[in-house]
Amino acid sequence: MFTSVQLLFAEQQNDSIVLGMSAAFKGPSRGLGIELYRGAMAYFEHINKNGGIYGKKIVIKAYDDGYNPSPTIKNTIKLVEEDKVFTLFNYVGTPTVTRILPILKSYSNRNIYLFFPFTGALPHRKPPYNEYVFNLRASYEQETGGLVENFIKIGRKKIGIFYQADAYGRSGWDGVRKTLAEYGSKIVAEATYKRGAKYSESFRKQVEILKNAGADAVISVGAYAACAGFIRDARDAGWDVPIANVSFTGSEFMINLLLEEEKKTGKKYTYNLINSQVVPSYEDMSLSAVRQYRTLMDNYNPMIPPEIMEKDYKPLKYSFVSFEGFLNAKVIVEVLKRLGKEPKRENIKKVVENIKNLDIGIDEKISFSSIKHQALDKVYYTTYKNNKFVPIKDWSEWKK
């Protein structure tokens, strides 16, 4: 005999597909979780308004983890055990995702998968955990490898690295180290910072370490508050070398902090900056996905649930992060459609691995297979000019 609460829950499950998300919605990295959520919801709102998936609405059940592993573990167990989500989606960060991989493995008999985490780390791309995770984005190894290659081509061979002292930072560090080794070189110096560092903190010691080692380019693998703080302190020290950041940094958040600093001090901070990205530019109106993304973000302007929202947060109109969330949503909608009117978890793996050459409106087709759970390999390079991030067409302006 069902209780009224159980019947209500069953009804809700019948008319909706619930995706579970744990991410930073509060704290110094909150923009990443919030904008990833907003981008995904812009597309889900569009789908829901147009009949959903065979009449079922897509819902994101989201919890804040502050970009810390312990809450992520608790949130994941709660999403699976109590909320009975259909699958996990849009998690943010390497230190958080790597800690839930054993949990995914323990739930393998329930066919619980994680779709499209916002991290390019390798642990969930390699055995034994790769079979429980599906990735859309390229890896940090691909991002940092490309940055190293481009710097070496323009004569900047003494590369230093500034990175977050955890699994995320080490993942990027490893990509830099491996690519330099292919060219018979080594990291010239390295400096770290503690996860959760705020922009207001000083990064002068890290700047000194890399500057004194004679680095002629720096690759940063961190979150936007710390990376912006490092750039500020480097420029204040009169150090003008190119500083590159990876996609996870959150380009717009980093730039906004530096623009505020420019207003306060009258100094210039937003030059000689390079950001690798794993999705095309949201300024590229030749792409149908970009046109749709901008239209739906404008139409719906989705917000996160108030219980996990800090009142002082100002949403970004567009960003690389929300565009990635939007593309994540497009692909998972295709998966849900292919699962049919009565979606079953046990069919997920087979359905996803059979997606070949799917056109989602960007310049690359999407494919998965039983041996490859990462759909995209392309890395895009941007720099900040004329008040926006523009594609780098010629690296020679940074030639040594």
Image (tube, rainbow, N blue to C red):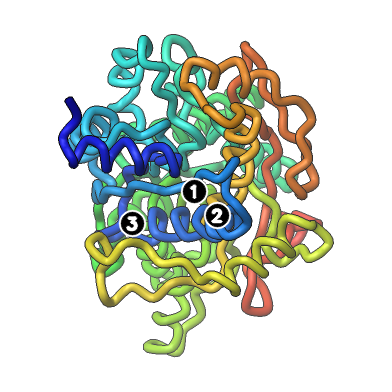
For residue 289, the mark is: none
Q: Position of residue 269 (x, y in %)?
A: 49, 74
Residue type pointed to by label 1: Lys
For residue 48, the mark is: 2
Q: Secondary structure at mark 1?
A: strand
Q: Position of residue 45 (x, y in %)?
A: 53, 59
Neighbour tally class for label 1: few under 14, some 14-19, many 20 plus, Cα within 10 Å: many
Q: Are marks 1 and 2 in contact (CB under 8 Å)?
A: yes
Nearer to us in this view, 367 or 213: 367
C-alpha span from label 3 to label 1: 29 Å
In the picture, measured across the screen, residue 68 lies left or right of residue 347, that is left
Residue type pointed to by label 2: Asn
For residue 57, the mark is: 1
N-terminal of the pair, mark 3 or mark 2, is: 3
C-alpha span from label 1 to label 2: 5 Å
Q: Position of residue 236 (x, y in %)?
A: 40, 73
